Image (tube, rainbow, N blue to C red):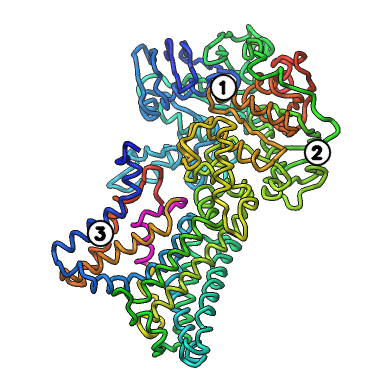
Amino acid sequence: MYEMQKIEKKFPGVHALKAVDFQVKRGEIVGLVGENGAGKSTLMKVIYGAYAPDSGKILKDGKEVRFGSPIKALEAGIGMVFQEQSLILNLSVMENIFLGNEAQFRRAGLINWKAMADAARKQLKKVKLDIDPSRKTSSLSFAQRQLVELAKVLTLEERVQGDLVILLDEPTSVLAKEEVELLFGIIRDLTKRASFIFVSHRMDEVLAISDRIYVMKDGAVVDVVAKGKATIEDIQHKMVGRAVNKEYYRERRQKPYDESRVLVELDGVSLPGRVRDISFKLHAGEVLCLVGAEGSGREGIVRAIYGMITPTVGSLKIKGKPLQQTTPRFAAEAGVGYIPRERKVEGIVSGMNVFENMTLSQQQRFSKGGVLKIAAEKALARDWIKKLAIKASSENADCGNLSGGNQQKVVLSKWRSGGSDIMLLDHPTRGLDIGAKEDVYEMVRDMSDDGAAILLVADTFEEAIGLAHTIIVVKDGKMQKRFDYKPGAKPEPYDLLHHMV
Amino acid sequence: MQNVLTRDNLLKWAPLLVLLALVLFFSVINPNFLSLRNFARLSISASPALMVAVGVTFIIIMGSIDLSMEGAVSALAVIFCYLLVWLGGSVAGLGCIAIPAILLLGAIVGAINGYIHVKLRIPSFMSSLAMGFVGTGAAVLMTGGNIVKIDDEVFRSLLTYRLLGFPLMAYVAFAFLLLGWVIQSYTRLGRNFYAVGGGEDLAHASGVHVKRVRVLGFALAGFFFSVAGLLQVAKLGQAESVTGANLMFISITSVVVGGVALWGGIGGVWNALVGVLIVAVINNGMIVIGIPDFIQDGLLGLLVIVAVVLSTDRRSVAFVK
C-alpha cells in the first residue's frame, strides 16, 4: 500500500539514508527503531514530506508519488503525529482539529461554529475521547492532547482518497503506563481505518504493538523483524551492530584521571521535575558521560551544574564550594564552561564576530573601567584560530557564517581561553560531519591532558564508550548504573542499552 | 575583496545610497536645496532628533524599544528651564550647574524606566510608553500649560553662534554622536547590547548580567534624551509640555530607515545618523520643492516604508509581529 524503494539521502558530510526499502501494508502497524543518528528521523521526514529524497521511488497505492512539502503528503493521506505536540494551546480543541481546514464550515465568510463542533465531536469519537470540542486545548492532559492530535490527523479520512498512513513519533514519551495501554487500544482499533508507523525508544512498547519492526543503523535498514520472532535483546544487538573503532575516539590518548582532585561533587541532588537523588564526583582529567534516553534527565543534570537550574534537595559543589548564587555567571566564574546542544540558540551569537564571541564570557579580563581592550581580544582570537585550526577568514568574520564544526570550535575556545577547567559538553558533535567530530574528540583528549574535567552527554553509545572513563546510565531521572573503564576493557553498547530501557 | 557588489555589502550601504539619491533628487528639482544655508537649517532641525535616535538605537540593538522620549524630553526641558532661571538665568554663572544636573537626571529617569521594565517584567514597549505619558503629565503639571522662556545669550549661542556656517549645536550633537559610537564600539556595555540583542539566552549563559545591561541601556537612552531636551531649548528658547512632541515618530523611523534591525543585534549609531538625515532631508526637501504641508506627513510615511524595504534585510525574520 505504501512502499519506498532504494531511498537515498545525503547531507554535506553525512550519508543519512542508504538505499532504504520500506513497506507498509494496509491496516498494519510498523515499528521503526534505531539509535540516535541512525537515520530514523531523516526517514520520517522523507515519509511525511519534509525532505525530498535524492533518489529512489515512493509508491502510494501503486502509483509513484513525490512530495515537495508536508501539505502534499497530507493530501496523499500521509499524516504525522509529532513528538513535541503540535497543537496550538490557546485555541479550542475543534479549532486545532480543523486548523487550516476551516473552509468547509464557512458560510458567507463566517464560521459556523455549531457545524464545526459537531464535526469535531465525530472526529473525537474515533479516538474515544469524550470532551467538549470548544474547550481550550491548554486545559487538557498530555494524554488527551495526544488523542486530539490523532483525531486531527484522522480528519484525512474524509478529506483524501485512498488509504491513510499515520506516523507516530514517540507518542508515549509523556504518557503514564495506563495511558499507554489506552492509546495502544485505540491504535489497534484504528487499524481498520489506517496504517501506522510507530517510532519509539521504548523497545517493549514497540514489540507489543508492531506487526513488523524495521531496525535502522547508520542510515540503512539492517533487519526487518516479524512479530513474535525476536526478543528485546535481539533487536538491541541489531541496533548497535558493529564493533567500535577504537582509534576514532582517540582511545590511546586516554589516561587515568587524578583521583585526588575533585572538581565537581553532587550529593543526593534532586531537581524540579523528575531528576532524583543524583550523586557523583567529577575529577580533574576525567571524562564522565551521562547516558540515557531523550528526556531521562541528563540535560537537567548538566544545566544544574551550570547554575541554570536550582537543586531542590542535595548539595552541588564546584571545587569544594557551593555556588554563591545559582546563576550561570557564578558558575562561569568558578571555571565551568558550557557547550550547549543548540549551538544557534545558546552557543554563539550569530551577528557577532569571532573575537567578540570568544570573549563574551570573559569581558572582565578584557576590559578596564568598562572600556574593552579590543587589540588584546583580537590577539587572543587569532591565537585560538591557529591553535584549533578554525576555518574563518579572520577574527572579524561573522560567526553566523561559519560551518557547524567551526562554530563549535569557537565555543570551545571561548571557554578554554578563559581558563575554564570544568567543561560541560551537551551533544558536542551533533550535526557535525566525521572530520569535525574527530577534531572535537581530539580536543576532548587535549583538555583532559590539561587537567580539565569533562562531563559529556554524547550523541551515540559508541561516542560515550569511546571517550569516557566513567559512564553513568540515567533512566527516568535516576542513576541506574555506573561503569568505570579503562581503554581496552570497555563495555559493549549492548551493556548500556540494557540498563536504559 | 574582488566582489564589492555582494548582497551583504549592498544592504550595508543601502541607507547611505538612499540618502545620496534623495539629496540628488531634491537638488535637481530645486538647486536652492544644495546650499550651505539650507544645510545649516537642516542641521538645526536634525540635531535634537539625532540625540533621541542615538539613545533609542542602543535600546533597539538590545531588541527592546523605548517610547518614553517625548515625555522625557518635555519634562527634562521644562525642568532645565526652571533650574536655569532659579540659578540666576545664565549658564555663564551658577546656571552652568543646570546642564550636568539635567544630564544626570535624564540618566536617572531612564534607569527608573529600565528598572520598571526589568523588575516588573513589563514589555519595554508598554513600560516606556507609560513612562512617557508620566513625563508629559509632569511637564504640564509643572508649567500649568504655560511656556517657560529662556533668554540667556550664552546658552542660546548654541543656535546663534556659527562656525563654518553651521550652528554650535550641530557640533555638540556630533560630539555626542561620537560619544555614542565610543560606547557602542569600545565598552563592555556596548558589546553587551549586541550580545543581548543577538542572543539573550546565550548572553545570560555566558555570564553576562543581562538585567543590569538592560537597565544601564535605558539609563544611557535617558542621558541622550536629556541632551535632546537641552538642544530643543537652545533651538526654541523656551520649554513647554509639547517640547518633545513628534520626536517619537522621527527618531524611531530614523533608526529603522538607517538600517538598525528592530529585532536587535544589528546596526549602530552611524545608522541612526544616516536615518535621521534621510528623514530630515525628506522633510526639508518637500518644503523646498513646495509640497503642501498636509501632504508631507502622508508622503513621509510612505517614504519610510519604502526606505525600510530598501535598507533592511528581512530574510532572517520568519515572522513579523
- Which mark lies nearer to you, 1 or 2? 2
**B155, A92: nearer the viewer:** B155
Q: Residue at x 57, y 14 (%)?
A: A217
Among the 4 quarters of the image, the one containing residue B53: bottom left
**B28, A127: nearer the viewer:** B28
Q: Which x, y percent locates residue B158?
A: 38, 80
Q: Among all residues in the image, which is located at the extreme top?
A: A229
Residues in magenta, as a range? B249-265
Q: Which residue is mark 2?
A: A265
Q: Relative to A85, does residue A198 appear above or below in the rendering?
A: above
SS at mark 3 in the image: helix
Q: Which residue is mark 1?
A: A37
Q: Among all residues in the image, which is located at the extreme right?
A: A260
- Chain of the residue under label 3: B
Tell me, yes or no, whether the highlighted magenta stretch contains residue B261: yes
Callout 3, which amino acid?
Answer: Leu
Q: Are marks 1 and 3 in contact (CB under 8 Å)?
A: no
Q: Residue at x 44, y 70 (%)?
A: B69
Callout 1, which amino acid?
Answer: Gly
Callout 2, which amino acid?
Answer: Glu
Tell me, yes or no, whether the highlighted magenta stretch contains residue A107: no
Q: Which x, y percent locates residue A48?
A: 44, 25
Q: Which residue is mark 3?
A: B302
> Where, quadrant-wise, is the N terminus of chain B in this rendering?
top left
Q: CA distance from mark 1 to mark 3?
A: 51 Å
- Chain of the residue under label 1: A
Mark 1 / mark 2, whichever is N-terminal: 1
Residues beneath discs 3 and 2 located on the same chain? no
Q: CA distance from mark 3 to mark 2?
A: 62 Å
Residues beneath discs 1 and 3 located on the same chain? no
